[in-house]
Amino acid sequence: MSTKLSNDPLAITLFSEIAVIDQLARTRLSRALPEGMELSHFAVLNHFAHMGSEKTPAQLARMLHVTKGAMTNTVTRLADAGFIHIRPDWDDARKKWISISPAGQAARDRAVQAIEPFFTDIVETLGTDKIRNLLPIFRELRSALLKS
């Protein structure tokens, strides 16, 4: 027997909660970031801080689940701020390779310090055990959403 999920109160409640949590978290994080830094800027800089290797704008767009146009805008702003290096692809002139600059690493580190109280507050409020129990569920949900 098939259930129509569009009218399922459980599914509606789940995604309503996710949407509200997303909005609240984005708002709090945006307010905490250093002046002039947007969440999209932080996401790119944070990715490079963890992964280190060069990426193309298209690769970054796929990894961060945004459009190529949105990533082009973010990359342009980061380059204007001196937070990333952009170099041509020596084999394909249509491609560009992006890496984080020392100024970008420093900006990312300042941003982490600025948002740390937000994360500390959430961990203290929920507790590490609850968060550890939630993570596998969130990862499974993300995986299911990527497949659909």
Image: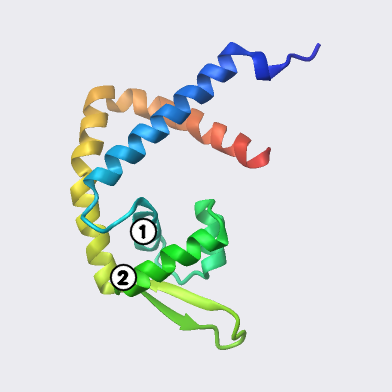
Nearer the N terminus, badge 1 or badge 2?
A: 1
For residue 27, which quarter of the picture?
top left
Colour scheme of this structure image? Answer: rainbow
Kindly identify the residue that appears in the image at 67 percent across and 19 percent down: 6
Seen in the picture, residue 130 relative to 3 is either above or below; the reply is below
* Residue 142 screen position, x and y as percent: 55, 37
Kindly identify the residue that appears in the image at 26 percent across and 58 percent down: 36
* Residue 146 screen position, x and y as percent: 62, 42
Asked if disc 1 and disc 2 are in contact, CB closer than 8 Å, the reply is: yes
* Residue 118 screen position, x and y as percent: 23, 37
Q: Amino acid at mark 1?
A: His
Kindly identify the residue that appears in the image at 53 percent across and 55 percent down: 63
- Figure quadrant of the N terminus: top right
- Figure quadrant of the C terminus: top right
Taking the view exactly as shown, the residue that stands out farthest to the bottom is: 90
Badge 1 density bin: few <14, some 14–19, many ≥20, Cα 10 Å: many
Q: Amino acid at mark 2?
A: Phe
Mark identifier at residue 125: none
Query: In the depicted view, which residue is nearer to us: 29 or 117?
Result: 29
For residue 124, which quarter of the picture?
top left
For residue 89, which quarter of the picture?
bottom right
* Residue identified by numbered label 2: 83
Q: Secondary structure at mark 1?
A: helix
Seen in the picture, residue 84 relative to 32 is either above or below; the reply is below
Seen in the picture, residue 100 relative to 60 is either above or below; the reply is below
Q: On the picture, is 72 further left or further right than 148?
A: left
- Distance, label 1 to label 2, CA atoms, is 9 Å
Mark identifier at residue 41: 1
Q: On the picture, is 75 further left or further right than 8?
A: left
